[in-house]
Image (cartoon, grey):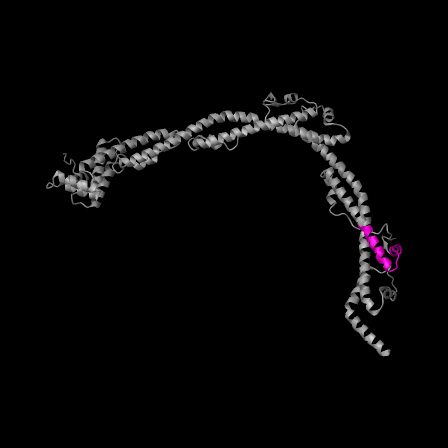
Amino acid sequence: METIEKDYYKVLGVSENADQETIKKAYKTIAIKFHPDNNPNDTVAEKKFKEACDAYTILGDCNKRQAYDLSRSKNNGINEMESIFQHFFGCSYFDLQEKIKKDEKAYDDYIVFLNELEVKLQSYGKSVSSLIKKLQGMRGYITSSEIHKQKNKLLQEYKIIEENAKAFDTFQKFYEVFKENFSVLTSEKWSNIENYCDKKNRSKYTPDEFEKLRRKMESKYDEKLQEKAQNLSLLEKKLQVRNIELDNYLGKRHRNGAALTKENVSTHILSILLESMDLMDEIDSYLIRVEITIEDYLKSQGKTIEEITRNELKVIRDTLKVEENAKAFDTFQEFYEIFKENFSALTSEKWSNIENYCDKKNRSKYTPDEFEKLRRKMESKYDEKLQEKAQNLSLLEKKLQVRNIELDNYLGKRHRNGAALTKENVSTHILSILLESMDLMDEIDSYLIRVGITIEDYLKSRGKTIEEITKNELKVIRDTLKEHSYWLKISLSKFEKECREIR
């Protein structure tokens, strides 16, 4: 068997009786002094650094040191030393030495592996430099099994990075073709794609994420193809109504210097052309009132439907719309001049919230449809008030008949704007006042009946008649009688008692 070759106490420069703190300080002093970072390219220093690490591996551990000291004893044989190491470490001293050498070799191989991995990772924007730095001075402190686990973990992570990078590169090739085709089809760019094309993110996204994005993009492309086919068919039908061939219509328009065709026209341009057709229909709705078509109008301007642009059509539409709105405004003012006089005569009221529709500043603001809607609303309200007037005239006539008064005579005693009231000129407002007056008379009668007289008697004693009395005068009489109703009851009881005594 081999004997122990090195004196670890001598390597660290301490006595065999030195305590653990002294050994630790001695090791740190030598490790700092001979560390490879402080002595680059110095093989002697590197050797002494490794010897110090080996010595501290044994002496720095109380159990290992105890076994080491026993093995140095001259009184103990090799078998005894073997049994001691077997007791503490489960192996012989020489097996331990072999294990240490195995761990150190695994460490050295691991450092080489990490340096090679660092070079590979740089192309992916990754690094293990911090791990390499962390492992400096750890030789002999990490077991080969731990190193094996770390190495396998890094290899798995590197495999994932490689797969992600490969998926990234494959996607870039797909996207180069896709973005050109998508741009031709839609005149648009695919949005929110920057992160997936940034080389800084070459290993960020998984193959599944790229596959999901690719399917989404292809699905959108197919959707846009269908949209294009549908819009081409719709545009062709709209052009047929105007006796225009689709190919001829497209050929008069250009994109990037090339005439449009069914193949190269984009969905975006098709949406513009369809909007142009809708504008033509709207313009026709204005021009039909003067019995011309947009074709006639454009011809007078030296234009054709095939050449006119959407923006030019918008200008024509807006111009015609302003003229149409202004015409509707003027027509409505003529209607309102007559309406407001009739409505005032019928109701004694003004139509509310009409100012904006009569303000000349808004002459082109409201559409013919808006004016028509308002006119119908006003006429409907007028008819409603006419019915209300007829009903209230009938009700008033019935209430007057109870008092033997003719309606014409009752109205004739009252005036509005210097003219006597008639069934024709009395307003709904005045009728409501007259009906309220009749209700007041009934209420007054309910008080006067207690003293055996009627309102006619009461008014006659004051030189008044029902035909002449006003609502406000009736209210005063009602309130006076109401206030003295308790007094009237007492007076009536006293009068009846006196009458009985006289009899």
Indicate the position of residue 313 as horizontal and vertical percent values.
68, 29
Indicate the position of residue 294 as horizontal and vertical percent values.
72, 27
In magenta stretch: residue 404 = yes
Indicate the position of residue 63 as horizontal and vertical percent values.
20, 43
Specify the quadrant of the image occupied by residue 244.
top right
Left or right: 19 as drawn, with respect to 447:
left
* Image vertical order of residue 450 relative to residue 270, above or below: below
Say whether residue 132 is visible.
no
* Image vertical order of residue 397 relative to residue 115, above or below: below
Indicate the position of residue 386 as horizontal and vertical percent values.
81, 48
In magenta stretch: residue 25 = no
Q: Which residue is situated farthest in the left direction here?
A: 75
Specify the quadrant of the image occupied by residue 25.
top left
Specify the quadrant of the image occupied by residue 453.
bottom right
The residue range painted magenta reads 388-412
In the image, what residue occupies the spot 34% across and 33% down? 154
In the image, what residue occupies the spot 54% across and 25% down? 181
Left or right: 214 as drawn, with respect to 267:
left
Give the quarter of the figure containing the N terminus. Answer: top left
| Total count of labels | 0
* Image vertical order of residue 203 relative to residue 16, above or below: above
